């Protein structure tokens, strides 16, 4: 486990659990060893904090490349933190650059790491669950690891868009882990990847009870002084 992540587990993790007392269900579905992908709904930037605070193992989150390229003190600090947490850099320019995250994630998964992916690609703009992108399933098939559906409820209340710090007492947070989905041996053609992704989203919906929207979520637009949308 990366040193900075370990420090966070000993400090931020207990503080989050004490301040918010999240309800956790299905933790027995999280493997003690071996690689797996956590695929969850995405309501708030606080999703990562809560997930990391309740899962005892190291979680590698995907982070967009802009967070690694900042200039000045703030930019260098952002790069230092993400690198120290073991985040996986994601390029959004498309083409070969966009596949770099897969190149980094597949060896990590095969080595027994846990990787977190939000199939919606961005935070839900209205609390509904949007159509999933196929990246998580492609990664699972390529690495030969299961996908663990994750349903998070209430984080959009404790840290809405534009709020920088989660607010204790603003709402109840629940995190539910579903049974692992094993896609080993399934074909990786476009139709199969779409069908498997829809299966993952269906399991997430069962955990959250969200209304499902059969189209991709629009990217959130924020003001310059507000936090930028977090990575897919």
Image (cartoon, helix red, strand yellow):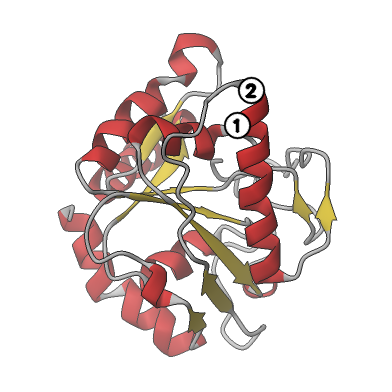
Decide if residue 151 is on the left or right side of residue 156. Answer: left
**Which class describes the residues within 10 Å of circle 2: few (<14), some (14-19), or many (20+)?**
few
Q: Position of residue 121 (x, y in %)?
A: 63, 40
Find the distance from the CA under tag 1 to the CA under tag 2: 5 Å
User: In the rendered view, would you say 220 is above or below 149?
Assistant: above
Decide if residue 44 is on the left or right side of residue 213. Answer: left
Decide if residue 128 is on the left or right side of residue 32. Answer: right
Residue at 41% x, 89% y: name it: 18
Please state which of residues 142 and 213 is positioned toward the viewer in this rendering: 142
Mark 2 lies on a secondary structure that is helix
Decide if residue 71 is on the left or right side of residue 165. Answer: left
**Within the image, what quadrant is residue 42 found in?**
bottom right
Q: How many badges with numbers are in the image?
A: 2
Residue at 56% x, 84% y: name it: 168
Find residue 225 and name its label. Answer: none
- Residue 190 can be seen, yes or no: yes
- Residue at mark 1: 193
Q: Position of residue 145 (x, y in %)?
A: 36, 44
Which quarter of the figure is the N terminus placed in? bottom left
Q: Position of residue 227 (x, y in %)?
A: 60, 49
**Which class describes the residues within 10 Å of circle 1: few (<14), some (14-19), or many (20+)?**
many
Residue at 63% x, 60% y: name it: 204
- Residue 70 can be seen, yes or no: no
Residue at 58% x, 21% y: name it: 189
Q: Are marks 1 and 2 in contact (CB under 8 Å)?
A: yes
- Residue at mark 2: 190
Please state which of residues 10 and 197 is positioned toward the viewer in this rendering: 197
User: In the rendered view, would you say 176 is above or below 69?
Assistant: below
Which quarter of the figure is the C terminus placed in? top right
Q: Position of residue 14 (x, y in %)?
A: 33, 81
């Amino acid at each position: 486990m990366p040193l900075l992540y370990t420090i966070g587990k000993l400090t931020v993790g207990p503080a989050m659990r004490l301040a918010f007392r999240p309800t956790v269900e299905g933790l027995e579905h999280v493997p003690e060893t071996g690689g797996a992908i956590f695929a969850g709904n995405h309501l708030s930037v606080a999703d990562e904090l809560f997930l990391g605070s309740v899962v005892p193992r190291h979680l590698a989150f995907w982070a967009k490349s802009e967070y690694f390229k900042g200039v000045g003190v703030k930019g260098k600090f952002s790069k230092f933190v993400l690198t120290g947490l073991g985040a996986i850099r994601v390029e959004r320019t498309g083409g070969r650059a966009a596949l770099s995250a897969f190149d980094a994630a597949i060896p990590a998964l095969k080595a027994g790491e846990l990787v977190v992916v939000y199939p919606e690609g961005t935070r839900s703009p209205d609390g509904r669950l949007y159509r999933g992108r196929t990246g998580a399933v492609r990664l699972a098939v390529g690495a030969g690891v299961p996908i663990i559906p994750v349903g998070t409820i209430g984080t959009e209340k404790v840290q809405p868009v534009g709020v920088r710090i989660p607010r204790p007492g603003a709402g109840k947070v629940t995190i539910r882990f579903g049974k692992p989905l094993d896609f080993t041996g399934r074909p990786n053609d476009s139709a199969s990847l779409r069908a498997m992704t829809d299966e993952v989203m269906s399991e997430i919906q069962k955990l959250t009870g969200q209304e499902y929207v059969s189209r991709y979520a629009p990217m959130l637009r924020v003001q310059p002084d507000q936090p930028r949308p977090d990575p897919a």
